[in-house]
Image (cartoon, coloured by chain):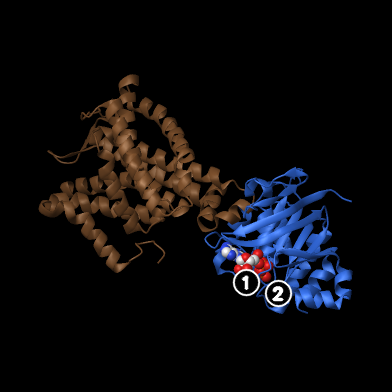
Chain colours: A blue, B brown
Amino acid sequence: MAELLLEAQGLHSFYGVSHILHGVDFSVARGETIGLMGRNGMGKTTLIKSMLGLVRPRQGSVRVRGRDMTQTAPHAIARAGIAYVPEGRGIFPNLSVRENLVMAARPGVDGRKEWDFNRVMATFPRLGERINHGGGQLSGGEQQMLTIGRALMTNPDLLILDEATEGLAPLIAREIWNIIRTIRASGIATVIVDKNYGAVMALADRSVVILKGRVVFAGSSNELTDNEELMHRFLGV
Amino acid sequence: MDLAFFLIQLLNGLQYGLLLFLVASGLTLVFGIMGIINLVHGSFYMLGAYLAWSLAGLTGSLAAAIAVGIPLTVLFGMALEWLLIRRLYERDHLFQVLLTYGLILVFEEMRSILWGDDVHGLPVPALLNVSIPLTETLSYPVYRLFISGVCLLLAFGLYLLIQKTRLGMMIRAGASNRDMVQSLGINIKLIYTLVFAIGVALAAFAGMINAPLSSVFPNMGGQVLIICFVVVVIGGIGSVKGAMAASLMIGLADTFGQVLVPEVAGMIVYLLMAVVLVWRPAGLFGKA
Ligand SMILES: Nc1ncnc2c1ncn2[C@@H]1O[C@H](COP(=O)(O)OP(=O)(O)OP(=O)(O)O)[C@@H](O)[C@H]1O
Ligand SMILES: [Mg+2]
Protein backbone atom coordinates (compact mmCIF):
# COMPACT_ATOMS: atom_id res chain seq x y z
CA MET A 1 0.00 0.00 0.00
CA ALA A 2 1.12 3.54 -0.76
CA GLU A 3 2.39 5.83 1.96
CA LEU A 4 -0.34 7.04 4.33
CA LEU A 5 -0.72 10.78 4.12
CA LEU A 6 -3.28 11.04 6.87
CA GLU A 7 -4.23 8.52 9.50
CA ALA A 8 -6.67 9.04 12.35
CA GLN A 9 -7.17 6.42 15.04
CA GLY A 10 -9.88 6.19 17.66
CA LEU A 11 -10.91 9.84 17.53
CA HIS A 12 -13.30 11.09 20.20
CA SER A 13 -14.33 14.72 19.76
CA PHE A 14 -16.66 16.92 21.75
CA TYR A 15 -18.34 20.30 21.49
CA GLY A 16 -18.67 21.23 25.13
CA VAL A 17 -20.44 18.23 26.63
CA SER A 18 -21.86 16.84 23.37
CA HIS A 19 -19.89 13.79 22.38
CA ILE A 20 -19.74 13.94 18.56
CA LEU A 21 -17.10 11.45 17.39
CA HIS A 22 -17.08 8.03 19.06
CA GLY A 23 -13.76 6.43 18.16
CA VAL A 24 -13.41 7.12 14.45
CA ASP A 25 -10.65 5.56 12.33
CA PHE A 26 -9.89 7.16 9.00
CA SER A 27 -6.96 7.11 6.60
CA VAL A 28 -5.91 8.43 3.22
CA ALA A 29 -3.03 7.05 1.20
CA ARG A 30 -1.05 9.00 -1.38
CA GLY A 31 -3.06 9.57 -4.55
CA GLU A 32 -6.20 8.01 -3.14
CA THR A 33 -9.72 9.42 -3.48
CA ILE A 34 -12.03 8.86 -0.53
CA GLY A 35 -15.73 9.58 -0.36
CA LEU A 36 -16.81 10.55 3.14
CA MET A 37 -20.56 10.20 3.47
CA GLY A 38 -23.33 10.36 6.01
CA ARG A 39 -26.52 12.27 6.54
CA ASN A 40 -26.76 15.75 8.08
CA GLY A 41 -25.15 16.22 11.46
CA MET A 42 -23.46 12.79 11.57
CA GLY A 43 -20.00 14.25 12.21
CA LYS A 44 -18.26 14.50 8.82
CA THR A 45 -17.16 18.09 9.26
CA THR A 46 -16.19 17.43 12.87
CA LEU A 47 -14.01 14.53 11.74
CA ILE A 48 -12.26 16.73 9.19
CA LYS A 49 -11.70 19.53 11.70
CA SER A 50 -10.41 17.03 14.25
CA MET A 51 -7.78 15.86 11.78
CA LEU A 52 -6.78 19.41 10.82
CA GLY A 53 -6.22 20.61 14.38
CA LEU A 54 -9.24 22.95 14.29
CA VAL A 55 -11.10 20.80 16.82
CA ARG A 56 -8.94 19.00 19.38
CA PRO A 57 -9.96 15.37 19.81
CA ARG A 58 -10.14 14.36 23.46
CA GLN A 59 -8.93 10.88 22.66
CA GLY A 60 -7.23 9.20 19.76
CA SER A 61 -4.39 10.19 17.48
CA VAL A 62 -3.81 11.92 14.16
CA ARG A 63 -0.72 11.09 12.14
CA VAL A 64 0.34 12.98 9.04
CA ARG A 65 2.95 11.24 6.85
CA GLY A 66 3.58 8.94 9.78
CA ARG A 67 4.30 11.77 12.21
CA ASP A 68 2.07 12.28 15.24
CA MET A 69 0.31 15.62 14.85
CA THR A 70 -2.57 15.20 17.29
CA GLN A 71 -1.56 18.31 19.22
CA THR A 72 0.13 20.18 16.39
CA ALA A 73 -0.98 23.68 15.36
CA PRO A 74 -3.33 23.78 12.34
CA HIS A 75 -0.85 25.74 10.23
CA ALA A 76 1.82 23.10 10.71
CA ILE A 77 -0.62 20.35 9.72
CA ALA A 78 -1.47 22.32 6.58
CA ARG A 79 2.23 22.68 5.86
CA ALA A 80 2.56 18.91 5.90
CA GLY A 81 0.73 19.02 2.57
CA ILE A 82 -2.96 19.12 3.42
CA ALA A 83 -5.29 21.72 1.93
CA TYR A 84 -8.83 22.33 3.06
CA VAL A 85 -11.87 23.60 1.19
CA PRO A 86 -14.29 24.11 4.07
CA GLU A 87 -18.03 23.93 4.23
CA GLY A 88 -19.34 27.44 3.53
CA ARG A 89 -16.18 28.11 1.45
CA GLY A 90 -14.21 30.37 3.78
CA ILE A 91 -13.09 32.92 1.21
CA PHE A 92 -11.80 36.20 2.62
CA PRO A 93 -14.50 38.67 1.55
CA ASN A 94 -12.34 41.68 2.44
CA LEU A 95 -9.55 40.58 0.07
CA SER A 96 -9.67 40.74 -3.72
CA VAL A 97 -9.74 37.55 -5.77
CA ARG A 98 -6.07 38.04 -6.61
CA GLU A 99 -5.17 38.60 -2.97
CA ASN A 100 -7.11 35.52 -1.85
CA LEU A 101 -4.92 33.47 -4.17
CA VAL A 102 -1.59 35.23 -3.73
CA MET A 103 -1.65 35.17 0.06
CA ALA A 104 -1.83 31.37 0.06
CA ALA A 105 0.96 30.67 -2.45
CA ARG A 106 3.62 28.27 -1.23
CA PRO A 107 5.65 25.36 -2.60
CA GLY A 108 4.59 21.85 -1.62
CA VAL A 109 6.23 19.62 0.95
CA ASP A 110 8.97 18.42 -1.38
CA GLY A 111 9.39 21.86 -2.93
CA ARG A 112 6.98 21.19 -5.82
CA LYS A 113 5.65 24.29 -7.53
CA GLU A 114 3.22 22.71 -9.98
CA TRP A 115 0.44 25.05 -9.00
CA ASP A 116 0.97 28.75 -9.24
CA PHE A 117 -1.10 31.81 -10.00
CA ASN A 118 -1.00 31.30 -13.77
CA ARG A 119 -2.05 27.67 -13.63
CA VAL A 120 -4.96 28.51 -11.33
CA MET A 121 -5.98 31.24 -13.80
CA ALA A 122 -5.84 28.74 -16.65
CA THR A 123 -7.92 26.24 -14.68
CA PHE A 124 -10.52 28.80 -13.57
CA PRO A 125 -10.85 31.36 -16.39
CA ARG A 126 -13.92 32.82 -14.68
CA LEU A 127 -11.76 33.96 -11.78
CA GLY A 128 -9.51 35.79 -14.20
CA GLU A 129 -12.44 37.91 -15.31
CA ARG A 130 -13.08 38.98 -11.74
CA ILE A 131 -9.52 39.16 -10.51
CA ASN A 132 -9.82 42.59 -8.89
CA HIS A 133 -13.27 42.10 -7.41
CA GLY A 134 -13.65 41.65 -3.68
CA GLY A 135 -14.06 38.03 -2.63
CA GLY A 136 -17.46 38.88 -1.17
CA GLN A 137 -18.74 40.11 -4.53
CA LEU A 138 -18.46 36.72 -6.24
CA SER A 139 -21.33 34.34 -6.94
CA GLY A 140 -21.47 31.09 -4.99
CA GLY A 141 -19.91 29.10 -7.81
CA GLU A 142 -17.11 31.60 -8.28
CA GLN A 143 -16.43 31.61 -4.55
CA GLN A 144 -16.16 27.85 -4.66
CA MET A 145 -13.69 28.03 -7.52
CA LEU A 146 -11.72 30.62 -5.59
CA THR A 147 -11.55 28.40 -2.51
CA ILE A 148 -10.40 25.44 -4.57
CA GLY A 149 -7.90 27.58 -6.47
CA ARG A 150 -6.59 29.00 -3.23
CA ALA A 151 -6.15 25.50 -1.80
CA LEU A 152 -4.22 24.46 -4.92
CA MET A 153 -1.88 27.46 -4.53
CA THR A 154 -0.42 25.63 -1.50
CA ASN A 155 0.65 22.69 -3.74
CA PRO A 156 -0.98 20.08 -1.51
CA ASP A 157 -0.65 16.31 -1.59
CA LEU A 158 -4.13 15.95 -0.12
CA LEU A 159 -7.15 18.14 -0.77
CA ILE A 160 -10.14 17.88 1.55
CA LEU A 161 -13.38 19.16 0.01
CA ASP A 162 -16.31 19.62 2.39
CA GLU A 163 -19.60 20.12 0.51
CA ALA A 164 -17.95 21.77 -2.45
CA THR A 165 -21.12 21.75 -4.58
CA GLU A 166 -23.61 22.64 -1.87
CA GLY A 167 -26.13 25.26 -2.96
CA LEU A 168 -24.79 25.53 -6.50
CA ALA A 169 -26.87 25.43 -9.69
CA PRO A 170 -26.55 22.08 -11.50
CA LEU A 171 -24.48 23.51 -14.33
CA ILE A 172 -21.97 25.12 -11.96
CA ALA A 173 -21.91 22.00 -9.80
CA ARG A 174 -21.00 19.99 -12.89
CA GLU A 175 -18.15 22.38 -13.58
CA ILE A 176 -16.88 21.88 -10.02
CA TRP A 177 -17.06 18.10 -10.41
CA ASN A 178 -15.01 18.37 -13.60
CA ILE A 179 -12.40 20.35 -11.76
CA ILE A 180 -12.30 17.80 -8.94
CA ARG A 181 -11.77 15.08 -11.56
CA THR A 182 -8.86 17.03 -13.05
CA ILE A 183 -7.29 17.50 -9.64
CA ARG A 184 -7.69 13.82 -8.85
CA ALA A 185 -6.13 12.85 -12.17
CA SER A 186 -3.12 15.06 -11.43
CA GLY A 187 -2.26 12.71 -8.56
CA ILE A 188 -3.43 14.79 -5.62
CA ALA A 189 -5.25 12.65 -3.05
CA THR A 190 -8.76 13.89 -2.24
CA VAL A 191 -11.34 13.47 0.47
CA ILE A 192 -14.76 14.38 -0.87
CA VAL A 193 -17.77 15.12 1.29
CA ASP A 194 -20.90 15.75 -0.77
CA LYS A 195 -24.63 15.10 -0.69
CA ASN A 196 -24.47 13.89 -4.29
CA TYR A 197 -23.55 10.34 -3.30
CA GLY A 198 -23.67 9.08 -6.88
CA ALA A 199 -21.05 11.57 -8.03
CA VAL A 200 -18.88 10.88 -4.97
CA MET A 201 -18.92 7.12 -5.44
CA ALA A 202 -18.22 7.41 -9.14
CA LEU A 203 -14.94 9.12 -8.26
CA ALA A 204 -13.95 7.50 -4.98
CA ASP A 205 -11.54 4.58 -4.67
CA ARG A 206 -12.95 3.94 -1.22
CA SER A 207 -16.02 5.13 0.63
CA VAL A 208 -16.47 5.74 4.34
CA VAL A 209 -19.92 6.20 5.86
CA ILE A 210 -20.45 7.85 9.23
CA LEU A 211 -23.52 7.41 11.38
CA LYS A 212 -23.80 9.40 14.62
CA GLY A 213 -20.08 9.76 15.00
CA ARG A 214 -19.19 6.15 14.20
CA VAL A 215 -17.82 4.59 11.01
CA VAL A 216 -20.46 2.12 9.86
CA PHE A 217 -19.03 1.34 6.47
CA ALA A 218 -15.54 1.49 5.01
CA GLY A 219 -14.79 -0.25 1.76
CA SER A 220 -14.86 -0.04 -1.99
CA SER A 221 -17.53 2.17 -3.48
CA ASN A 222 -18.98 -0.70 -5.52
CA GLU A 223 -19.62 -2.71 -2.38
CA LEU A 224 -21.69 0.16 -1.09
CA THR A 225 -23.66 0.93 -4.26
CA ASP A 226 -24.48 -2.77 -4.70
CA ASN A 227 -25.91 -3.03 -1.22
CA GLU A 228 -29.32 -1.36 -1.25
CA GLU A 229 -29.91 -2.03 2.41
CA LEU A 230 -26.74 -0.20 3.47
CA MET A 231 -27.51 2.67 1.13
CA HIS A 232 -30.94 2.97 2.64
CA ARG A 233 -30.02 2.53 6.27
CA PHE A 234 -26.98 4.80 6.36
CA LEU A 235 -27.62 7.33 3.66
CA GLY A 236 -31.40 7.30 3.38
CA VAL A 237 -31.44 6.51 -0.35
CA MET B 1 -7.07 86.00 12.45
CA ASP B 2 -4.59 86.83 9.76
CA LEU B 3 -3.27 84.41 7.20
CA ALA B 4 0.08 83.65 8.83
CA PHE B 5 -1.55 82.95 12.16
CA PHE B 6 -4.13 80.72 10.48
CA LEU B 7 -1.38 78.87 8.63
CA ILE B 8 0.49 78.23 11.87
CA GLN B 9 -2.59 76.81 13.56
CA LEU B 10 -3.35 74.70 10.51
CA LEU B 11 0.15 73.22 10.49
CA ASN B 12 0.03 72.64 14.25
CA GLY B 13 -3.33 70.92 13.95
CA LEU B 14 -2.12 68.66 11.16
CA GLN B 15 1.06 67.84 13.03
CA TYR B 16 -0.86 66.94 16.18
CA GLY B 17 -3.31 64.87 14.12
CA LEU B 18 -0.57 62.96 12.32
CA LEU B 19 1.12 62.20 15.61
CA LEU B 20 -2.16 60.94 17.03
CA PHE B 21 -2.51 58.69 14.02
CA LEU B 22 0.74 56.91 14.82
CA VAL B 23 -0.60 55.97 18.23
CA ALA B 24 -4.21 55.36 17.21
CA SER B 25 -3.38 53.18 14.18
CA GLY B 26 -1.87 50.53 16.45
CA LEU B 27 -4.86 50.66 18.75
CA THR B 28 -7.34 50.21 15.92
CA LEU B 29 -5.29 47.47 14.21
CA VAL B 30 -5.02 45.44 17.39
CA PHE B 31 -8.76 45.77 17.91
CA GLY B 32 -9.73 45.18 14.30
CA ILE B 33 -7.51 42.17 13.73
CA MET B 34 -7.16 40.52 17.10
CA GLY B 35 -10.32 41.81 18.75
CA ILE B 36 -8.39 43.14 21.74
CA ILE B 37 -9.36 46.27 23.64
CA ASN B 38 -5.91 47.40 24.65
CA LEU B 39 -6.05 50.00 27.41
CA VAL B 40 -2.31 49.82 27.92
CA HIS B 41 -1.59 51.20 24.45
CA GLY B 42 -1.02 54.74 25.79
CA SER B 43 1.74 53.43 28.05
CA PHE B 44 3.76 52.52 24.96
CA TYR B 45 3.68 56.20 24.00
CA MET B 46 4.97 57.05 27.46
CA LEU B 47 7.58 54.31 27.24
CA GLY B 48 8.83 55.83 24.00
CA ALA B 49 9.08 59.29 25.51
CA TYR B 50 11.00 58.10 28.58
CA LEU B 51 13.26 55.89 26.49
CA ALA B 52 14.02 58.85 24.23
CA TRP B 53 14.82 61.03 27.22
CA SER B 54 17.07 58.52 28.98
CA LEU B 55 18.78 57.17 25.84
CA ALA B 56 19.34 60.68 24.51
CA GLY B 57 21.00 61.43 27.83
CA LEU B 58 23.30 58.43 27.35
CA THR B 59 24.05 58.79 23.66
CA GLY B 60 23.83 62.55 23.38
CA SER B 61 21.37 62.58 20.49
CA LEU B 62 17.68 61.95 19.90
CA ALA B 63 18.40 60.21 16.61
CA ALA B 64 20.66 57.70 18.33
CA ALA B 65 18.09 57.27 21.09
CA ILE B 66 15.44 56.41 18.47
CA ALA B 67 17.75 54.06 16.60
CA VAL B 68 18.41 52.13 19.81
CA GLY B 69 14.93 52.56 21.25
CA ILE B 70 12.85 51.25 18.35
CA PRO B 71 14.34 47.73 18.30
CA LEU B 72 13.94 47.64 22.09
CA THR B 73 10.25 48.53 21.87
CA VAL B 74 9.65 45.98 19.10
CA LEU B 75 11.16 43.28 21.28
CA PHE B 76 9.20 44.54 24.25
CA GLY B 77 5.97 44.42 22.24
CA MET B 78 6.64 40.89 21.03
CA ALA B 79 7.46 39.69 24.53
CA LEU B 80 4.34 41.30 25.97
CA GLU B 81 2.11 39.74 23.31
CA TRP B 82 3.73 36.36 23.78
CA LEU B 83 3.58 36.41 27.57
CA LEU B 84 0.22 38.02 28.26
CA ILE B 85 -1.84 39.45 25.42
CA ARG B 86 -2.26 36.20 23.49
CA ARG B 87 -4.07 34.74 26.48
CA LEU B 88 -6.85 37.24 25.81
CA TYR B 89 -7.84 36.40 22.21
CA GLU B 90 -10.39 33.78 23.14
CA ARG B 91 -11.75 35.71 26.10
CA ASP B 92 -14.35 38.41 26.25
CA HIS B 93 -13.73 42.11 26.55
CA LEU B 94 -14.05 42.22 30.33
CA PHE B 95 -10.90 40.12 30.76
CA GLN B 96 -9.08 42.24 28.21
CA VAL B 97 -10.00 45.47 29.98
CA LEU B 98 -9.01 44.05 33.37
CA LEU B 99 -5.60 42.81 32.27
CA THR B 100 -4.68 45.80 30.15
CA TYR B 101 -5.86 48.25 32.82
CA GLY B 102 -3.77 46.36 35.36
CA LEU B 103 -0.80 46.71 33.04
CA ILE B 104 -1.22 50.50 32.98
CA LEU B 105 -0.76 50.51 36.76
CA VAL B 106 2.23 48.19 36.50
CA PHE B 107 3.90 50.33 33.84
CA GLU B 108 3.26 53.59 35.72
CA GLU B 109 4.84 52.06 38.80
CA MET B 110 7.79 50.77 36.80
CA ARG B 111 8.21 54.21 35.28
CA SER B 112 8.22 55.73 38.75
CA ILE B 113 10.82 53.23 40.00
CA LEU B 114 13.08 53.42 36.95
CA TRP B 115 12.81 57.07 35.98
CA GLY B 116 11.22 58.89 38.92
CA ASP B 117 8.25 61.25 38.98
CA ASP B 118 9.83 64.45 37.71
CA VAL B 119 9.03 66.27 34.51
CA HIS B 120 11.90 66.30 32.03
CA GLY B 121 12.57 68.36 28.96
CA LEU B 122 14.46 67.21 25.92
CA PRO B 123 16.12 69.66 23.50
CA VAL B 124 15.05 69.78 19.87
CA PRO B 125 17.87 68.23 17.77
CA ALA B 126 20.26 71.07 16.83
CA LEU B 127 20.05 70.41 13.10
CA LEU B 128 16.29 70.90 13.12
CA ASN B 129 16.16 73.63 15.72
CA VAL B 130 15.45 76.42 13.26
CA SER B 131 12.36 78.37 12.29
CA ILE B 132 10.95 79.56 9.02
CA PRO B 133 9.98 83.23 9.30
CA LEU B 134 6.43 83.90 8.11
CA THR B 135 5.98 87.56 9.00
CA GLU B 136 8.03 90.10 10.98
CA THR B 137 6.92 88.53 14.27
CA LEU B 138 5.70 85.05 13.39
CA SER B 139 7.75 82.04 12.36
CA TYR B 140 7.24 78.29 12.17
CA PRO B 141 9.55 75.71 13.78
CA VAL B 142 11.10 73.29 11.31
CA TYR B 143 11.00 70.48 13.87
CA ARG B 144 7.20 70.42 13.74
CA LEU B 145 7.30 70.18 9.95
CA PHE B 146 9.82 67.40 10.31
CA ILE B 147 7.50 65.48 12.65
CA SER B 148 4.61 65.88 10.20
CA GLY B 149 6.77 64.66 7.33
CA VAL B 150 8.01 61.60 9.21
CA CYS B 151 4.49 60.72 10.36
CA LEU B 152 3.22 60.99 6.79
CA LEU B 153 6.01 58.72 5.58
CA LEU B 154 5.23 56.15 8.27
CA ALA B 155 1.51 56.32 7.50
CA PHE B 156 2.28 55.69 3.83
CA GLY B 157 4.56 52.80 4.80
CA LEU B 158 1.80 51.33 6.93
CA TYR B 159 -0.61 51.66 4.02
CA LEU B 160 1.82 49.84 1.71
CA LEU B 161 2.43 47.12 4.27
CA ILE B 162 -1.25 46.41 4.83
CA GLN B 163 -2.58 46.91 1.31
CA LYS B 164 0.25 45.80 -0.94
CA THR B 165 2.32 43.08 0.73
CA ARG B 166 1.55 39.42 1.28
CA LEU B 167 2.00 39.93 4.99
CA GLY B 168 -0.66 42.64 4.79
CA MET B 169 -3.01 40.26 2.97
CA MET B 170 -2.48 37.67 5.68
CA ILE B 171 -3.14 40.29 8.35
CA ARG B 172 -6.41 41.35 6.71
CA ALA B 173 -7.43 37.75 6.09
CA GLY B 174 -6.82 37.02 9.77
CA ALA B 175 -9.32 39.72 10.67
CA SER B 176 -12.03 37.93 8.70
CA ASN B 177 -11.36 34.21 9.28
CA ARG B 178 -8.66 33.09 11.65
CA ASP B 179 -9.15 29.32 11.24
CA MET B 180 -9.04 29.54 7.46
CA VAL B 181 -5.78 31.47 7.53
CA GLN B 182 -4.23 28.73 9.64
CA SER B 183 -5.55 26.00 7.40
CA LEU B 184 -3.64 27.62 4.55
CA GLY B 185 -0.44 26.95 6.47
CA ILE B 186 0.02 30.44 7.87
CA ASN B 187 1.13 30.87 11.47
CA ILE B 188 -1.50 33.31 12.69
CA LYS B 189 0.01 33.58 16.16
CA LEU B 190 3.24 34.87 14.70
CA ILE B 191 1.26 37.39 12.64
CA TYR B 192 -0.57 38.60 15.72
CA THR B 193 2.72 38.98 17.56
CA LEU B 194 4.06 41.07 14.69
CA VAL B 195 0.97 43.26 14.43
CA PHE B 196 1.05 43.91 18.14
CA ALA B 197 4.75 44.75 18.04
CA ILE B 198 4.20 47.11 15.10
CA GLY B 199 1.52 48.90 17.12
CA VAL B 200 3.81 49.17 20.14
CA ALA B 201 6.67 50.49 18.03
CA LEU B 202 4.50 53.11 16.30
CA ALA B 203 3.14 54.41 19.61
CA ALA B 204 6.59 54.44 21.18
CA PHE B 205 8.04 56.19 18.16
CA ALA B 206 5.37 58.88 18.46
CA GLY B 207 6.35 59.37 22.10
CA MET B 208 10.03 59.59 21.15
CA ILE B 209 9.74 62.03 18.31
CA ASN B 210 7.30 64.25 20.19
CA ALA B 211 9.29 64.30 23.45
CA PRO B 212 11.11 67.58 22.67
CA LEU B 213 7.72 69.30 22.16
CA SER B 214 5.64 67.66 24.87
CA SER B 215 8.38 67.06 27.44
CA VAL B 216 8.33 63.84 29.43
CA PHE B 217 6.09 63.46 32.46
CA PRO B 218 4.18 60.90 34.57
CA ASN B 219 0.83 59.75 33.24
CA MET B 220 1.45 61.14 29.77
CA GLY B 221 0.20 57.85 28.36
CA GLY B 222 -3.23 58.21 29.92
CA GLN B 223 -4.02 61.47 28.11
CA VAL B 224 -2.97 60.06 24.76
CA LEU B 225 -4.92 56.86 25.34
CA ILE B 226 -8.20 58.68 25.86
CA ILE B 227 -7.79 60.84 22.78
CA CYS B 228 -6.80 57.79 20.75
CA PHE B 229 -9.94 55.96 21.79
CA VAL B 230 -11.90 58.97 20.58
CA VAL B 231 -9.99 58.72 17.28
CA VAL B 232 -10.71 55.01 16.94
CA VAL B 233 -14.40 55.46 17.69
CA ILE B 234 -14.82 58.40 15.30
CA GLY B 235 -12.88 56.66 12.54
CA GLY B 236 -14.71 53.38 12.90
CA ILE B 237 -13.29 50.61 15.05
CA GLY B 238 -10.66 48.62 13.18
CA SER B 239 -10.33 51.01 10.25
CA VAL B 240 -6.85 52.42 9.66
CA LYS B 241 -8.20 54.77 7.01
CA GLY B 242 -10.79 55.96 9.53
CA ALA B 243 -8.08 56.47 12.14
CA MET B 244 -6.25 58.75 9.72
CA ALA B 245 -9.34 60.83 8.94
CA ALA B 246 -10.35 61.05 12.59
CA SER B 247 -6.83 61.92 13.78
CA LEU B 248 -6.65 64.85 11.40
CA MET B 249 -10.15 66.01 12.36
CA ILE B 250 -9.31 65.88 16.04
CA GLY B 251 -5.92 67.48 15.59
CA LEU B 252 -7.49 70.42 13.77
CA ALA B 253 -10.56 70.71 16.00
CA ASP B 254 -8.46 70.67 19.15
CA THR B 255 -5.89 73.16 17.87
CA PHE B 256 -8.38 75.64 16.46
CA GLY B 257 -10.65 75.15 19.45
CA GLN B 258 -7.89 76.27 21.79
CA VAL B 259 -7.32 79.54 19.95
CA LEU B 260 -10.89 80.35 18.90
CA VAL B 261 -13.01 79.18 21.84
CA PRO B 262 -10.56 78.56 24.68
CA GLU B 263 -13.38 78.34 27.29
CA VAL B 264 -14.74 75.08 25.87
CA ALA B 265 -11.58 73.79 24.16
CA GLY B 266 -11.42 70.75 26.44
CA MET B 267 -14.83 69.58 25.27
CA ILE B 268 -14.48 70.07 21.57
CA VAL B 269 -13.15 66.64 20.62
CA TYR B 270 -15.90 64.96 22.61
CA LEU B 271 -18.54 67.14 20.99
CA LEU B 272 -17.08 66.16 17.65
CA MET B 273 -17.30 62.51 18.61
CA ALA B 274 -20.93 62.89 19.67
CA VAL B 275 -21.85 64.60 16.40
CA VAL B 276 -20.11 61.98 14.29
CA LEU B 277 -21.73 59.13 16.21
CA VAL B 278 -25.20 60.61 15.82
CA TRP B 279 -24.56 60.94 12.11
CA ARG B 280 -22.76 57.59 11.67
CA PRO B 281 -23.13 55.31 14.68
CA ALA B 282 -20.35 52.98 13.50
CA GLY B 283 -17.90 55.83 12.92
CA LEU B 284 -16.72 57.31 9.64
CA PHE B 285 -15.37 54.11 8.10
CA GLY B 286 -16.83 51.54 10.47
CA LYS B 287 -19.02 48.66 9.41
CA ALA B 288 -22.44 48.96 10.97
N1 LIG C 1 -19.60 24.41 16.87
C1 LIG C 1 -20.47 23.48 17.30
N2 LIG C 1 -20.93 23.51 18.57
C2 LIG C 1 -21.80 22.58 19.02
N3 LIG C 1 -22.27 21.56 18.27
C3 LIG C 1 -21.85 21.48 17.01
C4 LIG C 1 -20.93 22.44 16.45
N4 LIG C 1 -20.69 22.10 15.17
C5 LIG C 1 -21.42 20.99 14.93
N5 LIG C 1 -22.12 20.61 16.02
C6 LIG C 1 -22.98 19.43 16.15
O1 LIG C 1 -22.16 18.30 15.94
C7 LIG C 1 -22.83 17.32 15.18
C8 LIG C 1 -21.99 16.95 14.00
O2 LIG C 1 -21.88 18.09 13.14
P1 LIG C 1 -21.03 18.08 11.81
O3 LIG C 1 -21.02 19.47 11.31
O4 LIG C 1 -19.73 17.42 12.05
O5 LIG C 1 -21.92 17.16 10.89
P2 LIG C 1 -21.86 16.91 9.34
O6 LIG C 1 -21.87 15.44 9.17
O7 LIG C 1 -20.73 17.66 8.74
O8 LIG C 1 -23.25 17.51 8.87
P3 LIG C 1 -23.66 18.30 7.54
O9 LIG C 1 -23.91 17.28 6.50
O10 LIG C 1 -24.91 19.01 7.94
O11 LIG C 1 -22.55 19.22 7.21
C9 LIG C 1 -24.18 17.92 14.82
O12 LIG C 1 -25.14 17.37 15.69
C10 LIG C 1 -24.03 19.38 15.05
O13 LIG C 1 -25.23 19.95 15.48
MG1 LIG D 1 -20.61 19.21 7.46
| Disc 2: host chain | A
Counting from the top left corner in percent of width and height, residue B170 is at: 55, 51
Helix, strand or loop for disc 1: helix
Residue A140, labelled with which disc?
1
- The alpha-carbon separation of the residues under discs 1 and 2 comes to 9 Å
Judged from this view, the residue extending furthest toward the left is B263
Residue A172, labelled with which disc?
2
Q: Establish if A139 lies above or below B32.
A: below
For disc 2, the neighbor class at 10 Å (few under 14, some 14 to 19, many from 20) is some
In this picture, residue A50 sits left or right of residue A216 = left
Q: How many marks?
A: 2
Counting from the top left corner in percent of width and height, residue B127 is at: 30, 27
Counting from the top left corner in percent of width and height, residue B280 is at: 32, 67
Mark 1 and mark 2 on one chain: yes
Helix, strand or loop for disc 2: helix
Q: Establish if B126 lies above or below B169.
A: above
Contact flag, marks 1 and 2 (Cβ < 8 Å): yes
| Disc 1: host chain | A
- Residues B74 and B37: in front is B37
For disc 1, the neighbor class at 10 Å (few under 14, some 14 to 19, many from 20) is some
Quadrant of the image containing the C terminus of chain A: bottom right
Give the residue type at disc 1: Gly
Q: Establish if A87 lies above or below B100.
A: below
Counting from the top left corner in percent of width and height, residue B6 is at: 18, 50
Residue A149 makes an appearance in the image: no
